[in-house]
Amino acid sequence: EEQERDTRVTSTDAAGADLSGTTCWHHRATLSDSRKEIKDVAFAPSHVGLKIATASMDGSVRIYEAIDVMNLRDWALQGGFEAASENATCLAWNPSKFDAPMLVVGGRDVDQTAHVKVWHYPSAQRKWEVLEELEKHDQAVNDVAWAPNMGRSYHLIASAGQDQSLKVQRLLRSPDGLKRDVNNSQRLTSSAGATEVLRVEWNVTGTMLATSCREGVVQLWKSNFKGGWQEITALQSDNEARDMSA
């Protein structure tokens, strides 16, 4: 029974409130194509359409689309791709409306190589293809996050691995699409020393990065005037904050 729950994605929506004023969520659909545990799920940005991407331990990324946005019970498996030969652990959409649909996916192959790859869906080919591979992690990738592009000439992608590494990498625009800026890949170092980061999340402008680690600490990072990222605050689980900007 536990395995069955792990291999399904359920869609719910808010349908008004009950008499107490509490919002009621109703189950609308179940997406059950994966053969193994689902590790991550993400809605596409609105300009891509009402779509959901899932990352599975069978190595596949699957894309679902609502057939009728007014009827959320019907979702079609629009397509997908094999992101890794062993498992796909995390994913994030490119939020920019000026690019073709893109996903960054963390995965691991059978030889235990952990990688972060950018996939795109060019309208001419009408299938998902690898656009670029970012700097690898030594162990499985816990999370990835694609920063909102607020007027920058480049994209920023954050990734965290079980190898206690936290990286921010740049993607530059080129005639062939987006290319990794090999001169601007930064490994962030916490004031607390080596620690495994579990989750990464950008603010709405892509100028600050929040990370959470296994020790129960949330860290905030911000770019300095040289373009490097530095820790500015660490929020302890006991609500004590440490200012790192001084």
Image: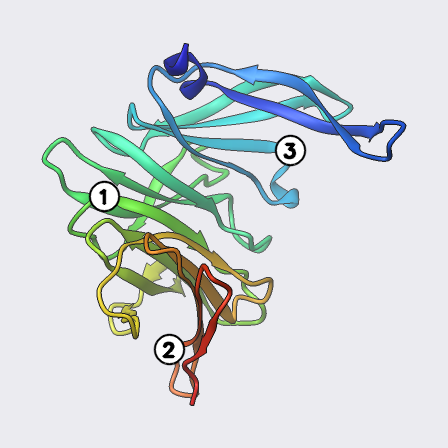
**What whole-number distance in Å separates the C-alpha atoms at marks 1 and 3?**
29 Å
Residues at badges 1 and 3 in contact (C-beta under 8 Å)? no
Residue type of the residue flagged with mark 3 = Leu
Residue type of the residue flagged with mark 1 = Ala
Whichever of callouts 3 and 2 sits on the residue coming sooner in the sequence is 3
Q: Is residue 107 above or below residue 208?
A: above
Residue type of the residue flagged with mark 2 = Gln
**What whole-number distance in Å separates the C-alpha atoms at marks 1 and 2?**
24 Å
Q: Which residue is mark 2?
A: 230
| Image location (x, y in percent) of residue 194 | 22, 64
Neighbor class of circle 3 (other Cα within 10 Å; few <14, some 14-19, many 20+) is: some
Left or right: 43 as drawn, with respect to 225 = right
| Image location (x, y in percent) of residue 133 | 27, 51
Mark 1 secondary-structure assignment: loop
Q: Is residue 78 above or below residue 106?
A: above
Name the residue rendered at 56%, 55% in the picture: 96
Residues at badges 3 and 2 in contact (C-beta under 8 Å)? no
Q: Is residue 216 above or below residue 117?
A: below
Q: What number is the disc on residue 140? A: 1
Q: In this view of the protein, which residue sits in the foreground, 23 or 29? A: 23
Mark 3 secondary-structure assignment: loop
Q: Which residue is mark 3?
A: 50
| Image location (x, y in percent) of residue 71 | 75, 19
Q: Is residue 51 above or below residue 149?
A: above
Q: Quarter-wise, where is residue 22 in the image?
A: top right
What residue occupies the far top of the structure in this picture?
A: 1
Marks 3, 2: nearer the viewer: 2
What residue occupies the far left of the structure in this picture?
A: 111
Q: Quadrant of the N terminus?
A: top left
Mark 2 secondary-structure assignment: strand
| Image location (x, y in percent) of residue 16 | 84, 30
